[in-house]
Image: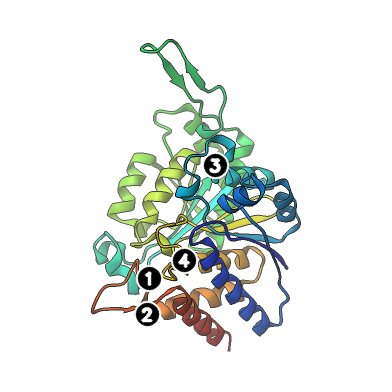
Amino acid sequence: MKILVLPGDGIGPEVCHEAVHTLKALAQARGLSIEFQEDLAGGAAIDAYNDPMPDEVIEKAKAADGILLGAVGGHKWDHLAGAMRPESGLLKIRKELGVFANLRPVAVSAALADASPLRPEAIAGTDMLVVRELTGGIYFGEPRGRSGEPGNEEAFSTMRYSTGEIERVARVAFEWARRRGGRVCSVDKANVLVVSQLWRDVVTQLQAREYSDVELSHMYVDNAAMQLVVRPSQFDVILTGNLFGDILSDAAATLGGSLGLLPSASVGGKVGLFEPVHGSAPDIAGQGIANPVAMLLSAAMMMDELDKPIIATAIRAGVETALNEGLRTADLHREGTTTKVGTAEMAARIRAAALDSLN
């Protein structure tokens, strides 16, 4: 396997280093060969190349089997605009790779139930996957723009989806449901939006035609937002469009108590992009206190996608062991109840436990 590592900015290089170290150790234990190549993205690429995602990096990405991406951006580059912003590099690489489905798993470990903003009894058993359409919908639909004179302006954005766009992301959700609990909840606003009516029709027809073994339900997005904070454990796979998925996946990300726990993947093209949900956190960069769990779990998602589930399972087992032993980085530490550790120590314990689980 050939893996391209784009550490990014802030805490990105720190957590990416631990993910690569862990993958190397587990691959060696299993007799697998992984070739790692590293390059720059985001602010680091702007400083070096005057481009947040150079074409040369894109070509390396297309030639890889998977891409590990750290967070990008930071105060240093906040004055930049448009295509020169670090975040614009993410949009470019997603477009170039053709990834159209964003996967965000949210599983709350029993060891972390008290860290959730919800009551432990409400969060118990939560293990969901949000599948968000990534390249269509109102963020990309045309026409869009502003018109009129100051004081009498109007602005417009267009939500558009085609049958093909809906079907391809729905297939991702149904396939994942087959690997999980066998249930998909498709979230829309079909009582108001014509585009959501098409979404619901296409998803329903696809399930009946190809995925009758998967249970399908539908939910309006406002109700889904409420249900996420009332009884999140009811969800297995949530399928939804770009706008609703953006909002719901961020809401779901708060359930575990820290963004430092949550991985994500952008898939659908030839090469998948795997990155933690959290940002670059420049305020703690270089201090060795960042939580590496989200990055390690992103690496686990990559191993799943590359058909190496034994390594993926080992990483998740390592995370669970470390959490059950009470190890916590600064974002989750509670004085008197957990043991505070740094990035390297947390990752080392996860790595050791992951290796133990292979034996």
Measure how far apart labels 4 and 1 are at the Cα level: 28 Å
N-terminal of the pair, mark 4 or mark 1, is 1
Q: Amino acid at mark 3?
A: Arg
N-terminal of the pair, mark 2 or mark 3, is 3
Foreground disc of the pair 4, 1: 4
Measure how far apart labels 3 and 1 are at the Cα level: 36 Å
Quick check: 264 above or below 355? Answer: above
Direction from residue 148 to residue 26 in the image, left or right: right
Q: Which residue is mark 4?
A: 286
Kindly state the secondary structure of the residue where label 1 is placed. Answer: loop
Q: Does the residue at mark 2 contact the one at mark 1 (Cβ under 8 Å)?
A: yes
Residue 155: % across, % down: 44, 20
Residue 341: % across, % down: 38, 77
Frontmost residue, 96 versus 126: 96
Measure how far apart labels 2 and 1 are at the Cα level: 9 Å
Measure how far apart labels 2 and 3 are at the Cα level: 40 Å
Foreground disc of the pair 4, 2: 4
Q: Which residue is mark 2?
A: 324
Residue drawn at (60%, 32%) of the image: 162
Kindly state the secondary structure of the residue where label 2 is placed. Answer: helix
Dot 2 crowding, Cα within 10 Å, few <14, some 14–19, many 20+: some
Residue 163: % across, % down: 61, 35
